[in-house]
Image: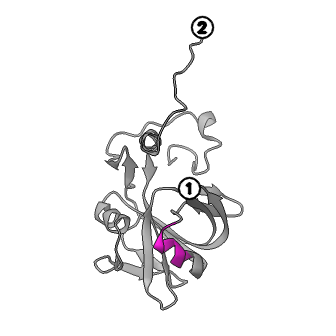
């Protein structure tokens, strides 16, 4: 016998945020250079791999983001996927401020974009398309350079805080994972 799930159509933005906070995400920092060659960037948890062929990713900046305006003008960006040792980097890039790179160690990608040191990996991308997404934009980027991968654990965000992955990994059966974009087979799925 099936029971009806309970829900409400009367919810506010705070309730919606709390509900969506039940979904665990990784944390990235999206970076670029402004017209004068100065680095700019912001912390972003609304990021995903989109397509393998062609290699596409997406992220969703707030429409009011100053950093997004710089990235849009530049036409290209770098996605820095943070490790679980980089909560301070996430906090720096998640807060308002003008010189977020002042105390952050970074290098340049082959295309000259900021790559934050000690990230798990990074991807340099060209903006392919920007769509409307309510109070955010949906930005699709084509990956042009893929960074080296470090053997570390990801920085995760869950229910408004950081989460550790220091527990044993449980691997579902292959049939359950075949449509996961980031699954690589065996027990190495992400």
Q: CA distance from mark 1 to mark 2?
A: 37 Å
Residue at 56 percent of width and 56 percent of height: 48
- Residue at 39% x, 51% y: name it: 156
Residue 105 spot, x, y in % from top left: 33, 78
| Residue 149 in view in this figure | no
SS at mark 1?
Answer: strand
Q: Position of residue 125 (x, y in %)?
A: 59, 72
- Across and down, in percent, residue 115 comes to 44, 76
Camera-nearest residue between 39 and 182: 39
Camera-nearest residue between 93 and 12: 12
- Residue lying furthest bottom: 36
Q: In this view of the protein, can residue 23 be seen by the observer?
A: yes
Prevalent SS, magenta region = helix
Q: Does 38 sit left or right of 180 as displayed?
A: left
Based on the displayed image, in which of its 4 quarters is residue 58 positioned?
A: bottom right
Element type at marker 2? loop
Which of discs 1 and 2 lies nearer the camera? The answer is: 2
Sooner in the amino-acid sequence: mark 1 or mark 2: 2
First to last magenta residue range: 64-71
Q: Residues within 10 Å of mark 2 (few under 14, many from 20)?
A: few
The residue that mark 2 highlights is 1
**Colour pattern of the rendering:** one colour
The image shows residue 87 at horizontal and vertical percentages of 30, 60
Q: Which mark is residue 48?
A: 1
Identify the residue at horizontal 55%, vertical 32% (top origin).
9
């Amino acid at each position: 016998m099936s029971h009806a799930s309970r829900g409400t159509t009367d919810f506010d933005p705070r309730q919606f945020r709390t509900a969506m906070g039940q979904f665990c995400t990784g944390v990235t920092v999206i970076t670029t250079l402004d017209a004068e060659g100065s680095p700019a960037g912001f912390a972003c948890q609304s990021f995903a791999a989109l397509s393998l062929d062609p290699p596409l990713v997406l992220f969703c900046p707030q429409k009011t983001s100053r950093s997004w305006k710089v990235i849009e003008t530049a036409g290209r960006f770098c996605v820095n996927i943070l490790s679980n040792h980089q909560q301070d980097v996430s906090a720096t890039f998640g807060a308002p401020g003008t010189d977020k790179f002042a105390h952050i160690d970074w290098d340049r990608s082959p295309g000259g974009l900021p790559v934050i040191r000690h990230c798990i990996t990074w991807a340099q991308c060209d903006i392919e398309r920007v769509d409307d997404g309510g109070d955010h934009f949906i930005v699709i980027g084509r990956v042009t350079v893929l960074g080296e991968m470090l053997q570390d654990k990801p920085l995760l965000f869950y229910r408004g805080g950081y989460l550790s992955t220091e527990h044993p990994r449980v691997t579902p059966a292959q049939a359950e994972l075949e449509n996961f974009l980031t699954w690589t087979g065996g027990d190495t799925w992400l």
